[in-house]
Amino acid sequence: MSEKHFPEGFLWGGATAANQFEGGWDEGGKGWSVADCARSHLDEDVQDYQKQNETLLKDIEEAVSHPDDLKHYPKRHGSDFYHHYKEDIALLAEMGFKVFRFSIAWSRIYPNGDDAKPNEEGLRFYDAVFAELKKYHIEPLVTISHYEPPLNLAMKYNCWYSRQTIDFFMNFVKTIVDRYIGQVKYWLTFNEVDSMIRHPYTTGGLIRDKFKDQNWEEVIFQSMHHQFVASALATKYIHEKDPKAMVGCMLTKLTYYPYSCRPEDVLEAQQRMRSTYCYSDTQVFGEYPSYLLARFKNHGLHILMTEEDLKIMKAYPVDFISFSYYSSSCVAKNDTGLQTTAGNTMTAIRNPYLSASEWGWQTDPIGLRISLVDLYDRYRKPLFIVENGVGEKEELIKDEHGNMTVNDQGHIDYYRDHFKAMYDAIHEDGVELLGYTSWACIDLVSESTKQMSKRYGFVYVDCDDNGNGTFRRYKKKSFDWYKNVIATNGACILNEK
Ligand code: BGP
């Protein structure tokens, strides 16, 4: 029997995001982003995003008055990719990466978001990043907006709640698309577009204090509408400028199982899945699904949409569906007395058949195959996994050759099982999967906890949760393992006895 492997041309790689990885937060003319005000809450349960929403204006004022404090604002230093990008991209090339997902920090290009002209020094940084990737023949996969809108847009315009932000966003899009035309084949407009509903500040720059006497759900969906229009306009512009380029939506693939076979629990799981599918449905089909419009009506939400908005959305749907998948969760109609655990920006019921990471996220490789089949059956468009991985607490050790490294066998085991599930989805279930970028290929600051100690990478970054360290990079045990997976296109694990 012939050796099993992934399809020829499968795009193996890894992902990062500027607000968690880049650092250089106030260098090169970059302006403040909402991420630069994200305080670490190491002593609190940071899964509770709602709590973070309640004191935002005070938190922002506190952050802006402490521009030199990197200890409590870890995203300001990230992993210092800003000064290590050559070394980092060389490490990705050493692993044989075919693709590298990163985001372009909006406030590095338009420091205040509403600037008349772009910041040339910010563009020159990304010129250099693209040049390094080109040198190693690594395909850039660019996220245009990844949790980092300019702070000024949030403070002065209420960011995505304001229709004007569509124009500010399109200034940003036109600048980077014109600058990098022909160099980017895969664009993503908004990271986890559905996350506006879970953390409206991080995703949409919405500061709750500024909407005291408004219907908050209506504010969120009005903002989401502006993002849908902006995403369609960006797709239009990219297709017109570079017909070979593809634009994807990016969905948080939260996969829910009914806690029991009780019909109420099965219905709850179906409803929860639709609570995120409604956003990818809108971007893939180019129109609001009836059940989302029903939610607007039944909740008395008045979302201002013009005929032109709906025409643009319908005319410019996305070309592929990208998504993040970390874990699965259980749901029940009545979860009283059931043990809960954490998941990606949410909490869920503990699945007794699954193990969980130190942060409570439940490891479920079969859930990835279920997610791939679900999404492909729903959309019949190519898929791209752009985030998958597990955060681990790790420490540097000296190996038998005297080199500093990390024995991250947990990462290897997690990835092996998920890669086998991906292969089965492709080979058995007929799913069209373009590629895979792990989250995160190099250690960086966690979104939900703002910790460096929640480590995802094949490469260890010497920086702790208080920002102390040399920022030196060290290859972990998984570095050579993933290098071999890429070199053999998966055969090394698919044909293991
Ligand atoms: C996703 C984000 C990523 C990353 C990832 C891991 O929601 O798109 O930016 O943060 O989650 O989550 P965390 O960093 O909270 O461990």
Image: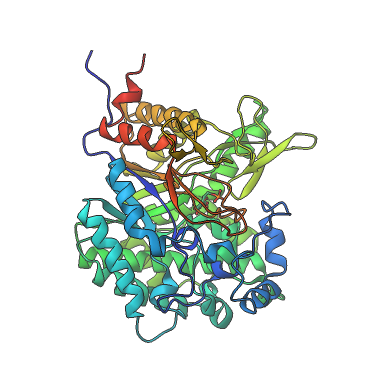
Assign the N terminus to one quadrant of the image: top left
Q: Position of residue 100 (x, y in %)?
A: 33, 51
Q: Position of residue 344 (x, y in %)?
A: 58, 47
Q: Residue furthest bottom?
A: 116
Q: Is residue 282 above or below residue 97?
A: below
Residue 373's x, y, as percent? 41, 34
Residue 217 figure quarter? bottom right
Quarter of the image with the C terminus is top left
- The foreground one among 96 and 350 is 96
320 sits left or right of 57 in the view: left
Give 160 or 99, whichever is nearer the viewer: 99
What residue is drawn where x is 28% and y is 47%? 93
Q: Residue at x 30, y 37 (%)?
A: 432
Image colouring: rainbow
The reply to whether residue 144 is in sight is no
Residue 17 placement (x, y as % from top left): 44, 58
Q: Is residue 243 above or below residue 414?
A: below
Taking the view exactly as shown, the residue that stands out farthest to the right is 337
Residue 371 visible in image: yes
Q: Quadrant of residue 427?
A: top left
